[in-house]
Image (cartoon, helix red, strand yellow):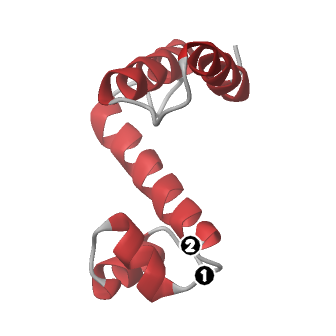
Amino acid sequence: MAVQTLVKDHKEKKEDKQKKDFSVDEYYELFSKLIEQVFETLRPPFHTHIYQHLLTIFEKAVVTLALKKTNNNQVRAAKLLGISRNTLRDRMKKYNIC
């Protein structure tokens, strides 16, 4: 099942109940399903040290998305992420995000 499908299904269930923000438990459920799919597709070199690989991938995705949502404004992206602008710039350099 694709990630978009998981999110869409979850949103539809949510709309049926009531309109509100995702809860921690709902994010946990969504991420657990996604990570389960990732585990099923892991191939070398990613079949070991899974924790570090997932953290790296997640961090790169979150930084990229924050920059996208703030039109590449580093100050606003850093504030959105709750990190300093210097830390954001370090992550951008680390992951080669322009």
**In the rendered view, would you say 1 is above or below 79?**
above
**Along the polypeptide, which appears first: circle 1 or circle 2?**
2
Query: Where the C terminus falls, by quadrant?
Result: bottom right
Number of marks? 2
Residue 30: x and y in percent read 48, 22
- Residue in the image at 48% along x and 85% along y: 74
- The kind of residue tagged 1 is Asn
Name which residue type carries label 2. Answer: Leu
Write down the quadrant of residue 91 in the picture. Answer: bottom left
Q: As rendered, which of 73 and 49 lies closer to the eye?
A: 73
As drawn, 66 above or below 78: above
Determine whether 66 is above or below 13 in the image: below
Q: Position of residue 64 (x, y in %)?
A: 56, 64
**What kind of element bears circle 2?**
helix
Horizontal placement of 15 versus 38: left or right?
A: right
Q: Residue at x 30, y 42 (%)?
A: 52
Please state if 34 lies on the left or on the right of 94 as rendered: right
Single out the residue that lies furthest toward the front.
Answer: 18
Dot 1: few (<14), some (14–19), or many (≥20) neighbours within 10 Å? some
Residue 82, position as x, y percentages in the image? 29, 68
Q: CA distance from mark 1 to mark 2?
A: 4 Å
Question: Badge 2 local density, few (<14 within 10 Å), some, or many (20+)?
Answer: many
SS of the residue under disc 1: loop
Q: Residue at x 35, y 80 (%)?
A: 90
- The residue positioned 40% from the left and 83% from the top of the image is 89
Percent position of residue 46, x then y: 45, 32
Query: Disc 2 marks which residue?
Result: 67
Reading the image, the residue beneath label 1 is: 72
Residue 9, image quadrant: top right
Q: Are marks 1 and 2 in contact (CB under 8 Å)?
A: yes
